[in-house]
């Protein structure tokens, strides 16, 4: 995919109705390719979405590659977690990227 095609895909995806329904986008996926993670990051930037990370582990080697770090360490309920997500008090962090 060349740069023009990539940018066209970002622009088209950013116009999707579903973008208006989300608060964050997973931009750092432990099982995602570099291209997939790059695409997600560029889409999140274009749409002004917060970014999250996860290991997405299916195998032992996938454990603890990416995570989402929350500013508050006192999240104890789903309601508190949702509040943190909506308010954007977090960021993706690399833990172990082989």
Image (tube, rainbow, N blue to C red):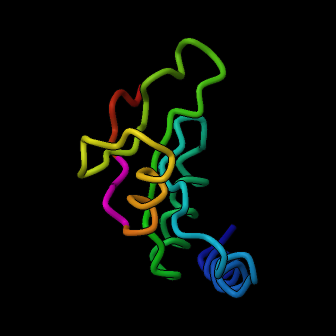
Would you say residue 91 sits in the magenta stretch? yes
Would you say residue 78 sits in the magenta stretch? no
Residue at the limit of the structure toward the top, as seen here: 60
- Residue at 50 percent across and 56 percent down: it is 27
**Which residues are the magenta region?**
88-92
- In the picture shown, does residue 43 fall above or below 63? below
Quarter occupied by residue 3? bottom right
- Residue at 32 percent across and 45 percent down: it is 69
- Residue at 34 percent across and 39 percent down: it is 94
Q: Please state the horizontal and vertical placement of residue 9, each as a whole percent of the image.
A: 70, 77
Q: Quadrant of the C terminus?
A: top left
Q: Is residue 58 left or right of residue 34?
A: right
- In the picture shown, does residue 18 fall above or below 41? below
Quarter occupied by residue 67? top left
Picture mark count? 0
| Main SS of residues in magenta | strand
Q: Is residue 33 left or right of residue 15?
A: left
Taking depth in this image into account, of 53 and 72 the one nearest to the observer is 72
Q: Please state the horizontal and vertical placement of residue 5, each as a whole percent of the image.
A: 69, 78
- In the picture shown, does residue 23 fall above or below 36? below
Q: Quadrant of the N terminus?
A: bottom right
Q: Please state the horizontal and vertical placement of residue 38, each as a whole percent of the image.
A: 51, 59
- Residue at 42 percent across and 37 percent down: it is 66
Q: Please state the horizontal and vertical placement of residue 56, each as a whole percent of the image.
A: 59, 33
């Amino acid at each position: 995919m060349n740069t023009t095609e990539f940018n066209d895909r970002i622009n088209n995806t950013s116009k999707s109705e579903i973008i208006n329904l989300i608060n964050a986008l997973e931009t750092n996926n432990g099982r995602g390719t570099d291209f997939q993670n790059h695409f997600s990051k560029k889409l999140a930037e274009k749409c002004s979405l917060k970014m999250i990370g996860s290991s997405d582990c299916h195998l032992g080697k996938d454990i603890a590659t990416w995570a989402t770090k929350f500013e508050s360490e006192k999240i104890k309920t789903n309601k508190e977690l949702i509040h943190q997500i909506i308010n954007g008090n977090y960021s993706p962090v690399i833990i172990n990227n082989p």
